[in-house]
């Protein structure tokens, strides 16, 4: 019945236009001569959008997609079915338009075909970070594929860097008319944020140094993702702060043992202020050159505050005389730990700066 409803005169014109532009492109890249390569294809985002618009306008292609392609994707014997789950009531026309926009943005971002042909999953995630998240989420197939990949359901290697807590709600939900962002939306926003700051994003080797390249607004967006918070919790636990062993107060943890969003935002803003002169790693001595406002930002992180406070307290047994009213306690592993309070830390750092002290261990 569907075949009888097709306007074949219009359909032939559409298919001819698609075939014509594709022939011109492949011929221009010398595929007909057997020497062509995908990176030589003379295409841009506008071209890709046009082709996918024509495909979406073809009734025959829509019918073939529904009758042949989608069942192939759903075939449990096919490896691709582990990655892509075809949702019920998929709008095929809208899906082609969304896929066209995704491919167009990837091409406009100058990501070479050679990187994508045999790429690992981190390269594809880096490519996804170049695409507007709303565009990615417009594609139901890409949405399902990303959820399966990021959740680990697809069983794809290369995502060892990610910590995936149990009970993640990946898809958007609604509270009445209010959108409640799902984890996929949040993690794509995080990828967009860090990609804008780090030109050479290597998602498989994410580290604290990379995070310090973001501005404050991007840092806050980045930590809107719970997967990112869980992942960076593990990175911060391994962070090297020069000769200072890090102190992790119990108050910074959420119910699942990961650092809170507020603490992760604060700690990245803090370590930005104490980057080593080499630009690689962190050096607490950089705190001696901070302004009073910057010291406040540094101590907004409970980790940095407790770490510096404990170091100064330890110096009180050998070098400094610390009055009792300059002390406070934090709970670490359910035990009270004495540290110098934030007001006194600020006073000490400013005083040491005036005195030209450059090493806390040799005061």
Image (cartoon, rainbow, N blue to C red):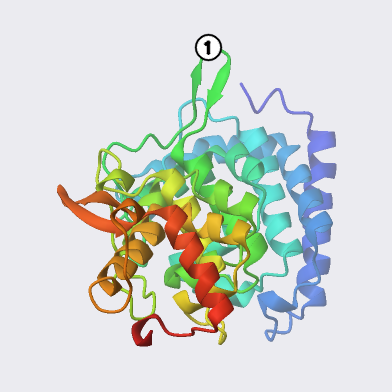
The reply to whether residue 199 is in sight is yes
**Could you tell me which secondary element the residue under label 1 belongs to?**
loop
Corner quadrant of residue 320: bottom left
Residue lying farthest to the top in this orientation: 176
Q: Residues within 10 Å of mark 1 (few under 14, many from 20)?
A: few
Report the quarter where the C terminus lies: bottom left
**Does residue 312 appear to the left or right of 35 in the view shown?**
left
Seen from the viewer's position, the closer of residues 53 and 263 is: 263
Seen from the viewer's position, the closer of residues 66 and 170 is: 170
Quickly name the residue at label 1.
Answer: 176
Where is residue 123 shown, x and y percent of the image?
52, 68
Residue at the image position 77 percent from the left and 62 percent from the top: 22
Residue at the image position 29 percent from the left and 58 percent from the top: 339
Seen from the viewer's position, the closer of residues 233 and 225 is: 233
Where is residue 8 shown, x and y percent of the image?
78, 34
Where is residue 304 shown, x and y percent of the image?
40, 61
């Amino acid at each position: 019945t569907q075949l009888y409803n097709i306007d074949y005169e219009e359909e032939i014109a559409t298919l001819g236009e698609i075939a014509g532009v594709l022939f011109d492109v492949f011929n221009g890249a010398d595929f007909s001569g057997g020497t062509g390569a995908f990176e030589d294809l003379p295409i841009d985002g506008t071209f890709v959008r046009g082709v996918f618009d024509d495909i979406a306008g073809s009734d025959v292609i829509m019918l073939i997609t529904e009758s042949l392609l989608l069942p192939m994707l759903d075939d449990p014997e096919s490896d691709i079915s582990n990655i892509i789950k075809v949702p019920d009531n998929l709008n095929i026309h809208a899906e082609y338009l969304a896929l066209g926009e995704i491919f167009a943005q990837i091409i406009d971002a100058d990501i070479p075909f050679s990187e994508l042909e045999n790429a690992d999953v981190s390269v594809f995630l880096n490519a996804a970070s170049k695409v507007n998240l709303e565009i990615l989420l417009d594609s139901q197939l890409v949405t399902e594929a990303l959820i399966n990949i990021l959740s680990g359901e697809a069983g794809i290697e290369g995502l060892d860097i990610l910590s995936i807590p149990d009970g993640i709600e990946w898809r958007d939900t609604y509270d009445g008319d209010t959108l409640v962002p799902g984890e996929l939306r949040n993690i794509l926003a995080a990828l967009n944020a860090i990609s804008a700051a780090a030109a050479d994003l290597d998602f498989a080797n994410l580290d604290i140094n990379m995070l310090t390249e973001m501005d404050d607004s991007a840092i806050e967006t980045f930590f809107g993702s719970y997967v990112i918070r869980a992942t960076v919790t593990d990175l911060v636990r391994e962070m090297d702060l020069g000769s200072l062993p890090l102190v992790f107060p119990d108050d910074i943890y959420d119910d699942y043992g990961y650092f809170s969003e507020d603490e992760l935002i604060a700690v990245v803003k803090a370590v930005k202020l104490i980057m080593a002169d080499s630009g690689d790693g962190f050096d607490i001595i950089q705190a001696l050159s901070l302004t009073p406002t910057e010291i406040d930002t540094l101590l907004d992180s409970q980790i940095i505050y407790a770490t510096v406070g404990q170091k100064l307290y330890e110096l009180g047994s050998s070098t400094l005389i610390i009055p009792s009213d300059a002390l406070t306690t934090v709970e670490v592993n359910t035990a009270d730990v004495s540290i110098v309070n934030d007001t006194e830390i600020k006073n000490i750092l400013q005083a040491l700066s005036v005195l030209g002290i450059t090493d806390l261990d040799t005061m």
